[in-house]
Image (tube, helix red, strand yellow):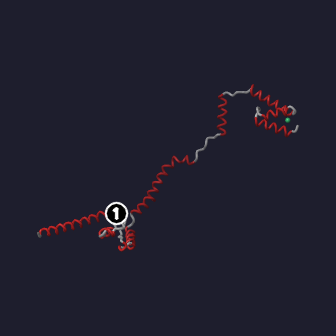
Amino acid sequence: MSRAKCDILRERAMQQGRDSAMFAAWRRHARDCQDCATEIRLLDLLDHQADTERMHLPRRNSAMLVEMVRQQYQRPPQPSWMACVWPYLWKPAVLAALVFALVQVIPQEWAETTAPADEVAADASAAVAALTVGDGCYFIPLQAGAHELEQAVLTATSPAEAVCLPEVLPGRSVDRAIRQLRERIHVQHCELENLIDRDLSAY
Ligand SMILES: [Zn+2]
């Protein structure tokens, strides 16, 4: 009997188990092969001893063995350095973010809303030059405290000239302009009343 065939049959029988068709084939082969018959007898003897003479470890010993294996091969995962330092770092990180926002972000927004007066004047001059009255526009600067705002509001004599309305107007200048307009209207109203009284008194 060829040795290679014995090895192949034994390997397949070991892989598929004692109840498999391959093990039965190996047993059939062992009828004509003394070496394989000896191996199968040894396997049957070991199997019989495993069933009848099996040693059972006490529960305490088996638990101790499991614990030893776990400590040997399953070391607890080491926490990352970030997890170690994060409890001490999150407060400074939040503080740094707040400081950055105060130093970088808010001044930029503040500068956008409160540009220096000379920049406003330069922008106003350029805008006035660009928007002429002939185009039906008058310029109202969008920044606070600009002299052009009052002049533009006070000199707007017809709705046709008020084409380019401002998006944002400073409250103080608008209030002052409205107050002056009301005073002028009040004066004209009084003059009209005087004229009407004079005309009526003639009759
Ligand atoms: Zn054989």
Q: Position of residue 52 (x, y in %)?
A: 75, 25
Residue type, label 1: Pro
Which quadrant is home to the N terminus? top right
Residue drawn at (39%, 62%) of the image: 113
For the point 25% across and 64% down, the residue is 182
In the foreground, 43 or 154: 154
Tell me which image quadrant ligand 1 sits in: top right
Please provide percent x and percent y for residue 110.
41, 61
Q: Is residue 194 above or below residue 104?
A: below
Residue 39 versus residue 199: which sits nearer the camera? Answer: 199
> In terms of depth relative to the viewer, which is nearer, 26 or 196?
196
Residue drawn at x 77%, y 29% as measured from the top left: 47
Name the residue tied to disc 1. Answer: 170
Q: Secondary structure at mark 1?
A: loop
Of 158 and 85, the residue lying toward us: 158
Determine which quarter of the picture holds residue 9: top right
